[in-house]
């Protein structure tokens, strides 16, 4: 699994309003992500993120809830106000639509999650016994009861606008529509590929970015069910791989 760069906190919404324009729809971020109180998470990466939060309860207990889906270049409220000041916890993972394994935003505190669907649990003593799985959460020090923002970032720093465009580029590749450099710049060839994709799927030609991302994600998920294991080399070095799998009562490599 790939570990992305972690989190950066702000005491209010991000001061990047001039960059919050979507590449295709040319519309701003949802109003609630700019004005509503609560804990917001902004996704400044090229992956669709799914996040779970941990909120301190009585004593040492922590209430863990998930999942909130956040598109690239989007901010979403993950915990409504009033917020509990002090350490809260956050874990993020990439959508299963993305190839190359799961990208995670993690920390050092282990809590239980339901990896398959929505959940809310309070510090079970044993994850496996409850049908849950352990994940490592990052502590986030919240200093305001009304509003707090945490940003997910990746190694290649992107603005929110470029994150949205890079997310579309990544999903186009995941869905088998077009492979191009994931850099946040959408050129003519990619625009044509998007137009052809919408036409082929009988979707509106004026589909906005949110709709395009949602459609591409579903196509990529469906496509992933029909292909085998893919190994991607994101290093600068040549790599050799071998696999092992079960054959009858033994293993074959």
Image (spheres, helix red, strand yellow):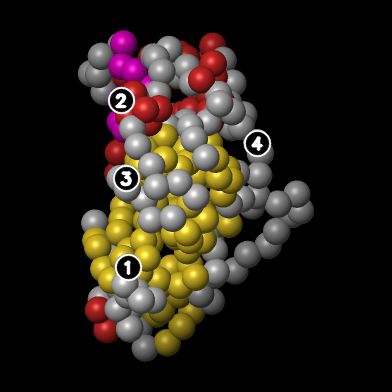
Residue count near mark 4 (Cα–Cα under 10 Å), binned few <14, some 14–19, many ≥20: few
Q: CA distance from mark 2 to mark 3?
A: 28 Å
Q: Which percent across, then down, holds residue 198?
A: 32, 19
Find the distance from the CA under tag 4 to the CA under tag 1: 35 Å
Residue 237: in magenta span: no
Q: Secondary structure at mark 1?
A: loop
Residue 21 makes an appearance in the image: yes
Counting from the top left corner in percent of width and height, residue 87 is at: 48, 61
The answer to whether the residue labelled 1 contacts the one labelled 2, judged by CB atoms less than 8 Å apart, is no
Segment colored magenta: 206-215
Disc 4 to disc 2, how far (Cα)?
A: 25 Å
The residue that label 4 is drawn on is: 157
Q: Is residue 223 left or right of residue 107?
A: left
Point out residue 251 in the picture as x, y percentages from the top left corner: 46, 83
Mark 4 near mark 2, Cβ–Cβ under 8 Å? no
Say whether disc 3 or disc 4 marks the residue closer to the N-terminus. Answer: 3
Which residue in the structure is indicated by mark 1?
A: 57
Residue nearest the viewer, comparing 111 with 131: 111
Who is closer to the viewer here, 176 or 87? 87
């Amino acid at each position: 699994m790939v570990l992305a760069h972690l989190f950066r906190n702000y005491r209010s919404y991000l001061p990047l309003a001039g960059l919050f324009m979507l590449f295709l729809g040319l519309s701003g971020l949802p109003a609630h992500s700019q004005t509503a109180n609560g804990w917001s998470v902004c996704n400044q990466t090229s992956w669709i993120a799914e996040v779970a939060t941990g909120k301190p309860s009585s004593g040492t207990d922590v209430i863990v809830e998930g999942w909130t889906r956040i598109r690239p270049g989007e901010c979403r409220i993950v915990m409504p106000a009033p917020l509990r000041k002090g350490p809260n916890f956050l874990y993020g993972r990439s959508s299963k639509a993305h190839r190359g394994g799961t990208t995670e935003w993690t920390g050092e505190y282990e809590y239980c999650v339901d990896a398959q669907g929505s959940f809310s649990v309070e510090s079970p003593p044993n994850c496996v016994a409850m049908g849950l799985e352990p994940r490592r959460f990052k502590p986030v020090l919240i200093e305001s009861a009304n509003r707090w923002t945490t940003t997910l970032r990746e190694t290649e720093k992107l603005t929110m606008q470029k994150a949205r465009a890079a997310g579309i580029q990544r999903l186009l590749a995941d869905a088998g529509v077009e492979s191009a450099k994931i850099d946040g710049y959408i050129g003519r060839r990619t625009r044509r590929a998007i137009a052809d994709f919408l036409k082929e799927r009988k979707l509106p030609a004026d589909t906005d970015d949110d709709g395009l991302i949602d459609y591409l994600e579903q196509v990529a998920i469906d496509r992933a069910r029909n292909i085998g294991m893919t190994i991607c080399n994101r290093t600068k070095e040549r790599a050799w791989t071998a696999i092992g799998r079960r054959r009858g009562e033994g293993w074959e490599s």
